[in-house]
Amino acid sequence: MFETLKNIGSRVDADYFDIRYEKKNETKIVFEGKELTELSSNSTDGYVLRVLVDGGLASIAFTRLEDAEQAIKQVRENARLIARSTEKKVVFAPVDIKKDRFTPSLNQDPRKLSIDEKLELTRHYNEIPLQEKKIATTHIGYLEVSREKYFISSEGAEIAEDLVTTRINGMITSRDGNLIQTVRVGIGGADGFARLRNQEGQFEKKTSIAIQLLNAEPIPAGIYNVILNQGMAGVFTHEAFGHFSEADLIEDNPSMREKMRLNARLGSEILNIKDDPTIPNQLGFYKYDDEGVEARPVQLLKNGVLAGRLHSRRTATVFGEEANGHCVAEDFRYAPIIRMGTIFIEPGPFSFEQLLEELGNGFYIIDARGGQTSGENFTFGAQYGYVVKNGKINQIVRDINITGNLYRTLMNISMIGNDLELCQIGGCGKGQLNIRSCNGSPHILIKEVVIGGV
């Protein structure tokens, strides 16, 4: 494939170009209740060509090799038009030029397993909640996505890397009369099919929660001290803080650039946040981004002070900082954009029991279920929670929304647990879908959180 890409590149007249070819395979299995509603496998492939001409950067996607000549002509003309129409000339930050072939180590490569085996495992997990009378329905599916990627650039880069993602996830819905409760469940990762096996406990636990929520009381609205579990704290870190660490989202926003300036104090001095795509065997792992830049960890927040941000080669130049391998595309249809890899709050020294003791009275909030951000303000729903009295977990509660200001919330983080967990099911919809976007956290204690309830 490298020779094919080089042949295309030999016809490109530009200050810089890169070409990415991908072959993408996807397998989907979906159950709606007892019914199998989808069973599909498909394979697609294509090319993305980016060129830089006189400071104008343009990209084009095409799927047939015979369309390369027309694509080259079109994208060069687009780059020239952009160059003539903008005062912001694109300059790529210098990076180490790599020649590498990277194949991840997988514990049972799903590409080598039969679809029958994948179907039966998905069916098995789907049947666990359906055995309970109070479970009205399920929506459980298997998703497998493999991307075989090849990248070359006019600077001499030649990189090949495979990304393989598997998961079984969905929703379990309980009903009692007119009251309906839904709980999300998910297992998966990027290190092989073996991760999906022997996970009955996850589906049994979430089935039990869905049933318990039928007898749960709605949470009373107010301002409380709370503990967020790893899932809820991880989503908060990704959504409320992480996106402001992506340089392209604050680049043309003067007020946010001022607030997110390096060395600005944004949070409690005990708070450290990192994005690290290089952690092996995790959902967010990759070795090279889609600009051919080797991924590396980035310390975003150090003792509450902003220490870094995520970059493409273009924004690294704009901000006068270094490129760090965080420019990722959904697949061959797209040029890459800045994305988080694995973002997480680093663990502190305290056990969960110590956090409960320090909390005393408040709420223990568990797992996110949607939400939104508006500038520095956020609102997230939680799947469920528990009342905490005198440091002990009590009755389950539902209908939970937490609302706040990012910076005030970061300042109010008063205690961090030692029990870091990274998510198995990720995803981010910024511009393009990134199913491998990963987040995590230990348990954290936050003071004075606004909770909307009844």
Image (tube, rainbow, N blue to C red):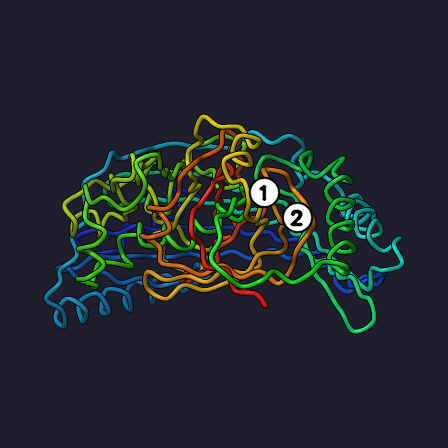
Could you tell which of marks 1 and 2 lies nearer the N-terminus?
2
Q: Nearer the viewer, residue 304 or 320?
A: 304
Alpha carbon distance from label 1 to label 2: 7 Å
Residue 262 can be seen in this image: yes
Residue shown at 60% from the left, 55% from the top:
43
Residue 64 can be seen in this image: no
Q: Which residue is mark 1?
A: 424
Asked whether the beta carbons under mark 1 and mark 2 sit within 8 Å of each other, the answer is: yes
Q: Which mark is residue 55?
A: none
Residue shown at 51% from the left, 53% from the top:
427
Residue 7 picture location, percent across and down = 34, 49
Q: Nearer the viewer, residue 34 or 201?
A: 201
Residue 171 picture location, percent across and down = 70, 58
Q: Which residue is mark 2?
A: 186
Callout 2: few (<14), some (14-19), or many (20+) C-alpha neighbours within 10 Å? many
72 in relation to 20, above or below: below
Q: Secondary structure at mark 1?
A: loop
